[in-house]
Amino acid sequence: MKKLILIRHAKSSWSSGVETDFDRPLNDRGVRDAPVMAMRLKERLPQVDAIVSSAAKRTMTTAGYFAEAYGLKSAAIVREPRLYHAPPQTFDELIVQLDDQLQTVIMCAHNPGITEFVNGLTQVRLDNMPTCAVFAVEVATERWQDFKTAAKSFLFFDYPKNVL
């Protein structure tokens, strides 16, 4: 069994003065939420083998907080440009290429694609994946290349304003 953890980047700044959406940093709330959510995820899933992130600044920064919580070096985060505003099929294309030695993988990306992708995985439906939300599924396979056809089970959904 594999586990896939989908994370939307933490809250970002619209008024940072950067010229492009790609370069937007996290705002104060995002900087507060990301390490908290990383520790909450680690309490539920103590082991993560890899992190794949959109190459945008806000997703890479968010992924960095999760890497830190798991004791992974930031250099271990796979920068994946195709996850920047990716449609659901891009997630599928990337997942089937994952190394089968990886049991638990985090993917950090953007709306609307991440919400659309999550809604196609199990019977659980979300109106919106909030910033820094975590959606976890178990995949009934030992080979990532079988991801599309493998049964998937909802594990949990968490987000910063969720009171546990």
Image (cartoon, rainbow, N blue to C red):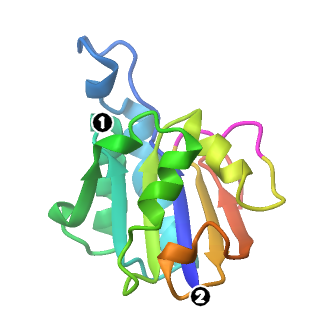
Quadrant housing residue 151: bottom right
The answer to whether residue 161 shows anywhere in this view is yes
- Residue that badge 2 annotates: 1
**Which contiguous range is marked in magenta?**
126-131
The residue under the point 49% across, 74% down is 145
Report helix, strand or loop for mark 2: loop
- The amino acid type of the residue labelled 2 equals Met
151 in magenta: no
Q: Residue furthest left?
A: 75
The residue under the point 40% across, 56% down is 35
Tell me where residue 134 appears, x and y as whole percent.
58, 56
Tell me where residue 38 appears, x and y as whole percent.
45, 62
The residue under the point 54% across, 69% down is 4
- The amino acid type of the residue labelled 1 equals Ala
- Residue neighbourhood size for the residue with mark 1, other residues' Cα within 10 Å, grouped as few (<14), some (14–19), many (≥20): many
Q: Say which mark, if any, is on residue 56.
A: 1
